[in-house]
Image (spheres, rainbow, N blue to C red):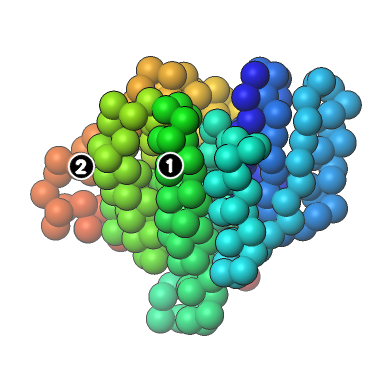
């Protein structure tokens, strides 16, 4: 039995992590902005499993709220054994057409929050000689796909570097790089995904189970789905000019909703 802290726990991939970890008997600390959503998740999980669920309502784009979550991660009297940095969102507008404030909030959640919480988690886990960090990145991080893709590229590179620094400490770091997954994210970003072929969709519960297997196997990169393993593999070795040209065409599948 151990304790996992999951950010973005109220829907999609974060909720799937909470359900799977609760099923496996872990206590949970769940983080998101909306307290009502967190209370629903807590009620659901405590009704089904004999576990403790602690609620932390926090907007990770705000420094003071992020600090509160980092302090909870670092609390040595109530150790966190698994940290899942999952909270995130995308935008429908391109960099030059959108608001800079929205871009900054996305950057703060996708990068700064991951940096600050990984720092708190890695230090306290390293002291105890055990623990795991999962940073939910994206296959978009392997290709030039707007500021979202750039932030995820940072997340993947950062997690690989963290894993290297933690080698031999008993603590692991894994970047989970999903492709398009059925969650609330695209609806919330007001993006029309109707042009995406069915074969490209992933299911959150399956990818979470695969990711936890990858963590157990000591993998630093977890890319769910054969189709995305192939894409990620090619993107990492193909000439950059070709990758840029193909990712430009692939980006057109995501259209702002009218
Ligand atoms: N869905 C995909 O196709 C896909 C593909 C690759 C990677 N990902 C990544 O997977 C992760 C989870 O996304 P999802 O698809 O599961 O999206 P989702 O269903 O929209 O869930 C996002 C979660 O993050 C929370 N959140 C959003 N902004 C936050 C903030 N400022 N502070 C704290 N919590 C915040 C949301 O709750 P509140 O609104 O209550 O805060 C919610 O719990 C993200 O990092 C995303 O980039 C998704």
Horizontal and vertical percent position of residue 155: 37, 51
**Image quadrant assignment for residue 209:** top right
Would residue 243 be visible to someone looking at this image? Answer: yes
Horizontal and vertical percent position of residue 177: 41, 40
Residue 198's tag is none
- Helix, strand or loop at label 1? It is helix
Please report the residue visible at 33 percent of the width from the left and 55 percent of the height from the top: 154
The C terminus sits in image quarter: bottom right
Q: Are marks 1 and 2 in contact (CB under 8 Å)?
A: no
Would residue 231 be visible to someone looking at this image? Answer: no
Left or right placement of residue 113 versus residue 75 in this view: left
**Image quadrant assignment for residue 179:** top left
* Residue beneath disc 2: 236
Query: How far apart, in angstroms, are the residues tagged by discs 1 and 2?
Result: 27 Å
Horizontal and vertical percent position of residue 202: 52, 34
Which is closer to the viewer, label 1 or label 2? 1
Residue 122's tag is 1
Instruction: Mark 1: give few (<14), some (14-19) or many (20+) Cα within 10 Å.
Output: many
Instruction: Return the residue nearer the eye: 176 or 25.
Output: 25
Label 2 CB sits under 8 Å from any ligand 1 atom: no
Please report the residue visible at 78 percent of the width from the left and 25 percent of the height from the top: 51
């Amino acid at each position: 039995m151990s304790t996992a802290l999951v950010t973005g726990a109220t829907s999609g991939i974060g909720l799937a992590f909470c359900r799977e970890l609760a099923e496996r008997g872990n206590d949970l600390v769940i983080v998101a902005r909306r307290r009502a959503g967190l209370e629903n998740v807590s009620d659901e999980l405590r009704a089904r499993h004999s576990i403790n669920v602690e609620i932390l309502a926090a907007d990770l784009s705000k420094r003071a709220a992020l600090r509160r979550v980092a302090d909870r991660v670092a609390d040595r009297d109530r150790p966190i054994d698994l940290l899942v940095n999952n909270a995130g969102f995308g935008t429908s507008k391109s960099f030059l057409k959108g608001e800079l404030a929205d871009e900054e909030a996305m950057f703060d959640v996708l990068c700064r929050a991951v940096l600050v919480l990984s720092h708190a988690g890695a230090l306290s886990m390293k002291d105890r000689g055990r623990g795991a960090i999962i940073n939910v990145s994206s296959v978009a991080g392997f290709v030039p796909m707007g500021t979202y893709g750039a932030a995820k590229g940072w997340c993947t590179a950062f997690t690989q570097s963290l894993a290297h620094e933690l080698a031999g400490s008993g603590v692991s770091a894994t970047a989970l790089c999903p492709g398009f997954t059925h969650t609330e994210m695209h609806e919330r970003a007001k993006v029309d995904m109707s042009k995406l072929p069915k074969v490209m969709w992933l299911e959150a519960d399956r990818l979470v189970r695969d990711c936890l297997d990858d963590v157990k196997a000591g993998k630093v990169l977890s890319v769910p789905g054969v189709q995305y393993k192939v894409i990620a593999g090619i993107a990492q070795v193909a000439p950059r000019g070709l990758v840029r040209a193909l990712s430009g065409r692939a980006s057109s599948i995501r259209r702002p909703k009218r």
